[in-house]
Image (cartoon, grey):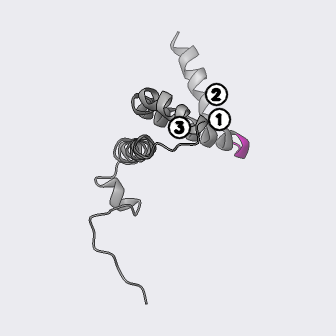
Amino acid sequence: MNCIFVLLIMLVSKIVFTESFLLVLSLLRVLGFAGMVLVLWSPIIVPLLPTLVLSWTTSNPSRFAEFVCIVGLYTAIMILVTLWGRRIRGYEDPLEQYGLDLTALPKVWL
């Protein structure tokens, strides 16, 4: 039984990651990120969907519903970027590492 595991480990260790495999893996990560954004954004967009559809069909914009949807999308993306940086990349302050630190004073480049 142990021989089968040793052979399996030897076969897996010989796998060469080709460029196409890495491209597919990157695409799956992006799709997973987009799916998680939709999962986090859905509690905000679903209750406002009738209001948004009504405003689009009557050409009478509902500014509040649009604003809440945009803020909700921004919040979902920032939550996922922070989680990705902490759990996957291991950064202590991922927003600063990605250049998204909004609390830092802006630097003037001359």
Label number found at residue 101: none
Which residue sits at x=49%, y=27%?
50
Amino acid type indicated by mark 3: Ser
**Which element type, helix, strand or loop, lies under badge 1?**
loop
- Neighbours of disc 2 within 10 Å: few (<14), some (14-19), many (20+): few
Residue 14 marker: 1
Callout 1 environment at 10 Å: few (<14), some (14 to 19), or many (20+)?
Answer: few
Residue 93 percent coordinates (x, y)? 29, 55
* Nearer to the camera, 16 or 95: 95
Q: Is residue 31 visible?
A: yes
Q: At 64% from the left edge and 27% from the top edge, which residue is drawn? A: 11
Horizontal and vertical percent position of residue 13: 59, 34
The residue stretch that appears in magenta: 14-20
Give percent across and percent down for residue 94. 35, 54
Q: Disc 3 to disc 2, how far (Cα)?
A: 58 Å
Give the residue number, with chain letter if any, for mark 2: 11
Three-letter residue code for mark 1 = Lys
Q: Amino acid at mark 2?
A: Leu
Sequence-wise, the earlier of marks 3 and 1 is 1
* N-term-proximal mark, 3 vs 2: 2
The residue at the point 42 percent across, 27 percent down is 47
Q: Name the spot of residue 108 as percent of width and height, x first.
A: 37, 83
Q: How many marks?
A: 3
In the image, residue 19 lies in the stretch drawn in magenta = yes
Q: Nearer the viewer, mark 3 or mark 1?
A: 3
- Residue identified by numbered label 3: 55
66 or 32, which lies in front? 66
CB under 8 Å between discs 3 and 2: no
